[in-house]
Image (cartoon, rainbow, N blue to C red):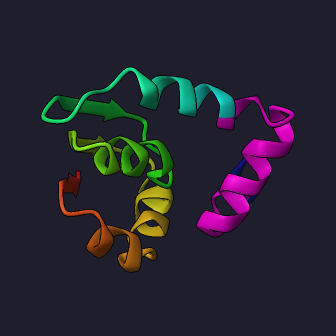
Amino acid sequence: MKWLETTPADYDRGLRLLTLGCDARVKAHIAETVCEGERVLEIGCGTGTLALMLARRGATVVGVEFSALAARNTMLRPQDLRAVRHFNHFI
C-alpha cells in the first residue's frame, strides 16, 4: 500500500476508496465523542485527518505516525497545522 503514501491527498483518497467512504463516517463518529479540553493520543495518525478534526473540537491532540513517509506527507499540510490552534505535534 505504499502507493497510498505518495501524497496526503492520494492517501486520503485511497483510504476513502478502499473503505467505500466508511472512514469518513467513522472519523466523524469518533470526533463527536470528543469534548473541548480533552487530551487525545492518536497512534497511527496517517495524514492527520482525524487528529485535525479532534483538535478543531478543542481537544489537545498528539499524533504518532511510525511511517516516515506518512509523517513527511503530514508535514506537507502546514496550512492545516497553523489553522488549528490546539494541535500539538507529530512524533
Residue 21 is covered by the magenta coloring: yes
The vertical placement of 27 against 49, above or below, is above
* Residue 87, percent from left and from top: 22, 55
Residue visible at 18% across and 54% down in the picture: 86
Span of residues in magenta:
4-24
Residue visible at 16% across and 29% down in the picture: 38
Residue visible at 35% across and 32% down in the picture: 43
Q: For residue 19, which quarter of the picture?
A: top right
Between 48 and 58, the one lying in front of the other is 58
Residue visible at 63% across and 58% down in the picture: 5
Q: Is residue 76 left or right of residue 85?
A: right
* Residue 59, percent from left and from top: 22, 39
Between 50 and 58, the one lying in front of the other is 58
Between 47 and 58, the one lying in front of the other is 58
The vertical placement of 56 against 22, above or below, is below
Q: Is residue 39 left or right of residue 45?
A: left
Residue 9 is covered by the magenta coloring: yes
* Residue 80, percent from left and from top: 39, 70
Q: For residue 35, which quarter of the picture?
A: top left
Between 42 and 85, the one lying in front of the other is 85
